[in-house]
Image (cartoon, rainbow, N blue to C red):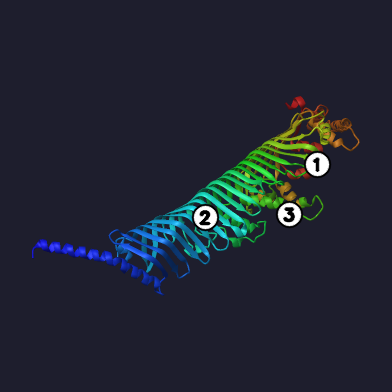
Amino acid sequence: MSKAKIIIGGVAVVAIAATAAHFAAPTFFENQFRAYLTNPKSDLRGEFDNFHLSLLEGTMSATNVSLRTRDGATMTGVGVVLEQVNWFTLLNANPFSDTLAGLALVENAEITYNGATVTSPAVSLSDVRMIEKDGRITYAAQSGELSDIKANDGAGTTATADLVALENVTETRFDGMTLQNLNVDIAPENQSLSVETASLSNCEVTQSLQAILQMPDEPFEFCSAVSGTGFEAKLPRKTDVTIASFGVTKLSTAGVQDAVITDIKAVENDQPIFSAGEVNLTGLHQSLRADEFNGDQKLDDREWQHLIDNLSIGAFSVTDMSAGDNEVSGTIKNFAISDLKDGALGKITLSGLKFQLPNNEDKPVLNITSFEMSNLSLGRLKQIADLYNVQTKSADPTAPIEEFEDETIGDIGLILAPMAYESFLLKDLSLSAQNRDIRNFTFGIDEASSTLSDPIRLEGSGTTFAKTAVSSYRGMYLELDDQSPLKPIISSVLGVDDFKRLSMNAKLNVAWDDQSGIYTYDLEDTSIDDIGSISLMAKFGNLTPEIMAKLHATHLGETDALKDIALGNTSLRNAKLEVTGDQLLKVALRLISTGNGQSPEDLQMAVAMILMQMQEKFAQHERLSDALTELVDWFNNPKHLVITLDPEEPVQMSKFAQRDIDPQTAADTFGLTIQANDAAQ
């Protein structure tokens, strides 16, 4: 037999075999499918009609398909079509690929489970894969689209979506999901939500398909990214919440990498209750445990410590925020925090704050133009809150003050300031009200600032203190209505006919050198506009770290112990008091003479006579006589006064407590010098 005849015969055999397979395959596969779907031991049961298969065209289809799982879920489709079918994969005989079909189409698909249903008139899946692992077969698809989805959980919750598009989806995860015009209605709770567009990326599905159909609160174990536009939620009490857009990345139970929400609005009973232009959050990490909190509204020390130890935020900000109702309302132009970690807040900024109580009879309004603070200690913040949140049932107004006797000098920060923060700056604070007794008034501060530096931890103390502290305020003022009954009283004390604004300024510097033991208290230029100013500086020695630790560990109520430590161990190096302005003494005299039957002029004359008598008595003592002469000069013409204590050697503070020391010896010991008016220039 020739080679040509053999080849022709072989081709004929293959053609005959292919033709036979083409016509025999539909019957073969149909019988196999029906046998599997009717086998009582199969994981999947069901039936179908009008089965069609074409080996040459690579298609397979059926109508009236109905499948049931062992769990009771039912999946049906009026028509199911598979195109570009890989027959070897279907026979589980393809070692090179798990692709089952290039395209799968389902007409009028429906899934039901335990009373819940999901329907879609058109479902399409591309690159459908059949994956066998550990003896179990699962399915996946490169992409898919479900149009006009309708879902019902059987308990009154329904959901619809114009389109759901999927990317690289398996039974346990999907790379992407896009939803258009999603609407969820929770009828039993009178709630609903809608989203115009939403996208989810890299989501792990931890619930089974059947469980997801029940619409649980958390159907996905979070996604690497979630975003959307046109969100609206309708909640009970006629509350509506709308969001223009939102986006979240790296969301998990441990936190979130980035989140942004824009144009938030909340309305209750047709009244706005909250709005914000934009909310940003980055680097949220938490490992909080619910069992660490006892459920009380107030956090105890243990709960607070657990909170600050297990929560960190890279940055958080909100702009153009407004919140409130008829009782309380407030607006904030900008609020931001950053670097919340390790029990400290790196920075907090606030601008454009307005807070008011519209229905309060006094109509109070608080305004702050700007405020910023750096390196705030959250632990110290809790201590301050506890310290000043004094609870007492006593009607005695001094009772809250007596509570402080149980606090230490260090707790209150009387000598060294605890490092509660590193710096703060406040601008344009005002509090105004319309009190019926004092009429319209405004209290405010143009600017206040403070810096704490050079931290140190004293022996036996768990608090870090600042060796250097600088604080000041400028323009602390009071404005009163012309009809206020307080205005003539204050005008009388100040010796002025009228005033529009009463303003004060001050600056305080505190420094401690732990090496030399020198502590300096310097109150600079505390002044009242057009009245005068006072400054005070005192420098103390021998305040070693050991002495400072004892002072800060002593309770405020332990007066004897405080005297022993302060007077027995420390010394005065020098001090200076300076008074300028001819109105300050007159103001003091008016205040003292109020209610004692004397006029300020009579009181001034009486004090001047006492000083002149003392001057005559100590005329033989040059230092004391000169000092009293200057003091009399100032008392008669109070323009400028400087009182200085400048001993040749540091003087033990116990000297101040000696009752038997005579005035001239005291003047020499403490280096007393008084200069008045021209001599003080």
**Which element is circle 3 on?**
helix
**Which element is circle 1 on?**
loop
Q: What's under tag 1, amino acid-wise?
A: Ile
Say the numbered circle drawn on residue 215.
none
Disc 3 crowd, CA 10 A, few/some/many (<14, 14-19, 20+): few
Indicate which label's residue lies in the foreground, 2 or 1: 2
Q: Position of residue 459 (x, y in %)?
A: 62, 52
Seen as rendered, the residue at the extreme front is 50
Q: Quadrant of the C terminus?
A: top right
Would you say 438 lies left or right of 596 here?
left
Dot 1 or dot 3, earlier in sequence = 3
Task: Name the residue: 67% across, 59% down.
Answer: 296
Name the residue tied to disc 2. 160
Name the residue tied to disc 3. 406
Q: Is residue 250 visible to the viewer in this orientation of the structure? A: no
Name the residue tied to disc 1. 661
Asked if 677 appears above or below 79 in the picture, the reply is: above
Indicate which label's residue lies in the foreground, 2 or 3: 2
The reply to whether discs 2 and 1 touch (Cβ–Cβ < 8 Å) is no
Task: Name the residue: 76% across, 43% down.
Answer: 655
Seen as rendered, the residue at the extreme left is 1
Q: Mark 2 to mark 1: distance in Å? A: 94 Å
